[in-house]
Image (tube, grey):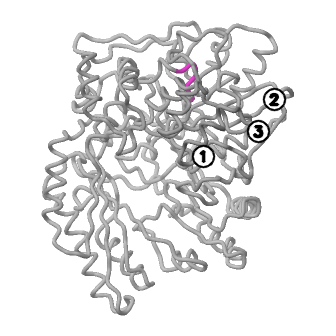
Amino acid sequence: MFDPKLKEALSHVQKPGRYTGGEPGSVYKDKSAVDVRFAFCFPDTYEVGMSFLGEKILYELLNAHQNWWCERAFMPWLDMKAEMERLHLPLYTLESKDPLTDFDAVGFTLQYELSYTNILAMLDLAGIPFYSKDRDERWPLIVAGGPCACNSEPIADFFDIIQLGEGERQLPAICAEIENAKREHISREVRLLRSATIPGVYIPAFYDVTYQPDGRIQAITPNRPGVPAVVTKAIIEDLNDFAPPTNFVVPMVGAIQDRASIEVLRGCVRGCRFCQAGFLYRPMRQRDASLLNRAARDLCANTGYEEISLSSLSTSDHSQLEEILDDLNEWTPQQHVSLSLPSLRMDNFSKSMIEKTTKVRKSGLTFAAEAGTQRLRDVINKNVTWDEIEKTCNIAFSEGYTSVKLYFMMGLPTETMEDIEGIAETAQRIVDLYYHNPDKPKGKSVQVTVSCSCFVPKPHTPFQFVPQDSRETLEAKQKHLLDRVHSRKLRVHSHESTPSFLDGVFAKGDRRLAPVLVAAYRNGCYFDGWEECFKYDTWMETFAQLGVDPHFYANRPIGLDEVTPWSHMDYGVTHEYLVREYKKALAAQTTPPCNRACHGCGANRLLGGPCFDYSTDLV
């Protein structure tokens, strides 16, 4: 039954469906009959969190254990947060409505740096101390995982356990350790020491960080015997061992991406030098077509979804993509289920692909060109030429499309104003292609939308060594781009530079930023990823009050031999390879996709052998 305080709170908020639970697909268990209770927390709104495939994967995986119960919690929006504080209502999970303090472990996913203050807000609403050192046996273990774990140092002091790599391997092992510890009545310290032996598990309290006089890191060393000096990420060698989830929780309030999502592969062969995910999830591994078809059919039957998204970093690189689409088209048209490929590349786009994904309904086309000139595309290793862009757009226009969205980045290494002009010129050339295409839709005009984000150098990429463009430089480039656009057929959207600056600070930050996060939260900073909530001036005042220079992290180059906050975190790709790729970038030299030839990045060590069978033609 609902707590009377919760009923009162729900009567005063705009979207009570975010906080009620009870959605189709939710898992309910007898809490007195389970041994481990895990609260999966997404540090953003319900609509954002319910779009996250990782939560769906782990929710189904953990709840498959009869004596474990995984429940969900999300960051309440401003109105609900205020009501919970007014009524002293602690943050709870949607399934049982129990407070987070009732759980054995509370896990957060680290999807983006601007969610860090939301993590503090959720701990605060739950009444859980922020710092790991302030929590004893009475408190749940606070666990984290996700892509930002690759440099979790700015928030390391808040967590007991951080998972590097793929959670399907680690999280069940952590839950099993919690179950054993409860049975044996062992201390928190022993429990953490045991957890440190699980592949990919990082216990921040077991490492000390020392600094040089100029602020750079001197060393990161273990302070317990038997703790590894370098933590290597956990990996699933064969994705077919873990079938995609087939029982999603169907949201009550529309999620941002409310569809049946099937992960067809993990990793990427492309090696784009700006793309952190492409390096973190190496090597590329794919699921078999037959497994994907069965999972998609079961998922649609169980949830009622009428759209399937074949998700990955680069779905069109799946070696069985045509077979997958053929299998799906045997049943999706009859059931009025549409198909979408959210990650299309311009160099392998085809008429066949359009025909096989538009039998039910036609979705929009979005392509990531990333840079406006060939020189800069070579610098970032995009490996896309104008001929391929032209061919792709002509196919799209001939097949009836009248709008195309293009993604670019601004602030890339070696970028000049000529490269910025190239963005406008590329977009205009695509407009001209439409009107010169004899097979274009008759009597319709074209619309090309350009979306420009601000580039943020990220750890574990070849561009981790470069400084981020200053706010002034980015704003000058944005203005220059707008000045170069003269057609009403072009729309340009540029992202605000200040959130990207903060992204850069925490992407490459260290443990000295934890007090800044706490102080900023106390000063009213949370929902930093939302434009209406972002308080740039408050952040800058907080940095100044604590004597921390944010530009030290975002706007200075990192030495090729420098100890970084993430030097003790091994994601498979060697430091030497990142340096080689960085130097090739400066020379505008490209590296072909790694399914064509091995370039020695080191990720094959994680599989114990070659990533691909190079005796066959994989291209």
Residue denoted by label 2: 31
Q: What amino acid is at disc 3?
A: Asn
Q: Earlier in the sequence, mark 1 or mark 3?
A: 1
Secondary structure character of the magenta stretch overall: strand
Label 2: element kind: helix
Q: Residue furthest right?
A: 33
588 sits left or right of 9 in the view? left
Q: What residue is shown at x 18% (from left), y 58% (from top)?
A: 420
Place of residue 67 in the rendered image (x, y in percent of width and height, measured from the top left): 83, 31
Q: Earlier in the sequence, mark 2 or mark 3?
A: 2
Start-end of magenta stretch: 159-163
Q: Which mark is residue 63?
A: 3
Crowd tier of the residue under label 1, counting other residues whose Cα lies within 10 Å: few below 14, some 14–19, many 20 or above = some
Q: Which of the 4 image quadrants contains residue 141?
A: top right
Q: What amino acid is at disc 1?
A: Pro
Place of residue 282 in the rendered image (x, y in percent of width and height, measured from the top left): 51, 44
For the residue pair 173 and 115, the one nearer the viewer reads as 115
For the residue pair 86 and 228, the one nearer the viewer reads as 86
Residue denoted by label 1: 16
Answer whether residue 353 is magenta in the image: no
Q: Nearer the viewer's eye, disc 1 or disc 3?
A: 1
Q: Which of the 4 image quadrants contains residue 510?
A: top left
- Separation (CA) of disc 2 from disc 1: 25 Å
